[in-house]
Image (cartoon, rainbow, N blue to C red):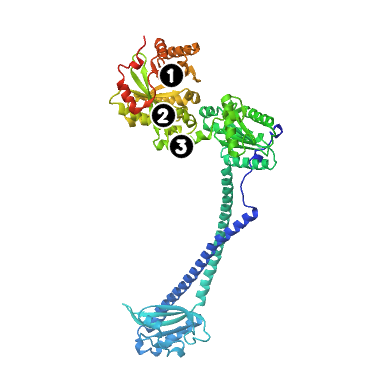
Amino acid sequence: MGDRVTARVADLLPVETHVASPRSATRMFVVYALISLIPVALLGLALAGSYRQSAAARGLSESRAKAALLARTAVVPLISRANLSDGLSPHQNAALDRMSAEAIASGQFMRLQIRDLAGDVIFSTDPSLADRAPDDEAVEAAHGETVSRITHLDADNNPNGPQGAKVAEVYQPLLAGNPAHQLGVLEVYLPYAPIAADVDAGVGALYRDLGLGLFLLAVLLAGISHSATRRFRAQLARNAFLAQHDVLTGLPNRALFQQRVVEALARATRGGPGVTVAVIDLDRFKEVNDTLGHANGDALLCELGHRLAQAVGGGDTIARLGGDEFGLVLTECGNEDDVLTALHLLRRILQQEIEVSGLPISADASIGFAMWPEDGQTVDSLLQHADVAMYVAKAAYSGVVRYDEAHDHYDSGKLSLVAELKRAISANELVLHYQPKASVASGQILAVEALVRWRHPERGLLYPDAFLPIAEQTDIIEPLTEWVLVSALHQLSLWSADFDDLAVAINVSARNICRGDFAQTVLRAIRGSGVRPERLLLEITETAFVTDPERAGRSLRQLAAAGVRISLDDFGCGQTSLGYLSTLPLHEVKIDKSFVMDMLDDHSHAAIVRSVIDLAHNLGFEVVAEGVETDRVLAELTVLGCDIAQGYLLAKPMPAQDLAGWITAQEAPVAISPVA
């Protein structure tokens, strides 16, 4: 493995994606660009058509304005005193002829006729049309409406033959006097060519500007399309990468790791190299997070992941499985010695000093591994067995450990019980039994310890040893503890009428006490029960302090401040520092039953019991001895000054419905009377 330390991270992290090829990317861009041009082209056609219509309407509007000006300035002054129904005088006809000749010669209009209100022509620049019958437009104009249209000069005379020049035909009412009254109708044919030229010039300018605008719009849309498709492809590639890689370190994630194991196993079954799966867990990483913050913890993970990635070969895979746990697939190590050499080298690489926020940090790791096919033949079995070996390495502080079936205490039966336990909580299959705790001096029943039992539908009544150890390794311990807490407090509230000073003790695991919301959960349950807080006693195991002393202490101080009493359970058989006893808000210490039961026959156990009693009393704690089963043990505890006894000599755990009667039946609690 030493010759592979220089491998690059980039070689280790192939992007498992299907990114579009240049040809397909170009084809995608062209398709999107063409699709985006369709609405642009339709918009151009719609704008051009709309402009042509508006231009034609503007041409007619200009023609009507010219006809109105002609009528008002040139025609009406010549005929204003005439009665058109009687015709025009020779003088008026001559004047109109002169005006018309000059106007036609200058191109102001091409033809002019004057009609009376009956529609008859009384003047025309073209005598051949003088006898033409009134048309609909002339009738409308005789009623005061201006009528105009685009037509050809001889369209009415030659409907099927050649037509004349394009003109604007306008029928304009002739108004005179004050107030104005209509004399007749002016029918004038204005040349449309100047108007058409103006319209065409405007349309040409529009087409030019519109074409340029649409071209720029098309370029913009093409750019947007190109940018969008590029970002889309990049996002697809990123999504595909993130689906198989860890966001923080860039290493393969659990899904890709398992895929690589599958691929390695497939090659191995075809005669390829062997496969080793290893799980690497950082030791004391939580201390870095708690002391330096999560940002520095993330920086440490990134650096360590980078080191691991550089240290493995191209055919191997290093992955981040979650948290501070990494997975490793080795395919180029032939035997166990090679694997051990490679993994010890990795461990030494991780131990090299790292500077985080100006502080030198030396990381350490526990590594467990499993080899195919001896330790497992599937992805799941190899990974699970490597995980078991890692926990063995962590517990033994041995660094690197290979899977050994003798160390595997996890069986499918226990795991299935955990799955069933989730259902059992909601199905009301759990029940509490209560074991009394009595004063050694007076025999008075001071408290009861709530002990959970499981009425399994197939296996019968199960004791805690059958399901609690494995439950404490999973999240199921949290709802289970909350159920015990709520149920015991509810039962205590039912006993309050008869036993108002009776307390209940509940066992809490390290997993519970280290949760940030544990204190709130307990206080909420107390409020819901109506029980006084001092009637609840929480029995905490020593492992809670070893696991996370700061968080455990914070939760306990909050509960103690509210009145809840705290007991240190199984004292003497764990790793509790004596310093905790002076800093934590404890009320009592329970001596582990293994010392109590053997204290008469084992002088060292007797010395431990005596020392614990003296130490606890000096610190102001009460002492509980559990496992009291004989009168001789009770007598010795009395001599040593033990405060409270619990054990079969007093009573075995019993259902709630039996406990009240049992307490009432005690006559001056003779079952544990003081021993002289």
Rendered view: 90 above or below 291: below
- Local packing at callout 3 (Cα closer than 10 Å; few below 14, some 14-19, many 20+) is few
Between disc 2 and disc 1, whose residue precedes?
A: 2
Which residue is depicted at the point 61% across and 25% down? 398
Q: Which residue is mark 2?
A: 452
Residue 536 falls left or right of residue 373: left
- In the rendered structure, which amino acid carries the disc numbered 1? Gly
Asked whether 253 or 35 is in front, the reply is: 253
Q: CA distance from mark 3 to mark 2?
A: 16 Å
Q: Which residue is mark 3?
A: 420
- In the rendered structure, which amino acid carries the disc numbered 3? Glu
Between disc 1 and disc 3, whose residue precedes?
A: 3
Q: Visible in this render: residue 308?
A: yes
Rendered view: 293 above or below 105: above
Q: Which residue is mark 1?
A: 627
Looking at the rendered structure, the secondary structure element under dot 1 is loop
The quadrant where residue 565 appears? top left
Q: CA distance from mark 2 to mark 1?
A: 18 Å
CB-based contact (under 8 Å), mark 1 and mark 3:
no
Which part of the image, by quadrant, shows the C terminus? top left
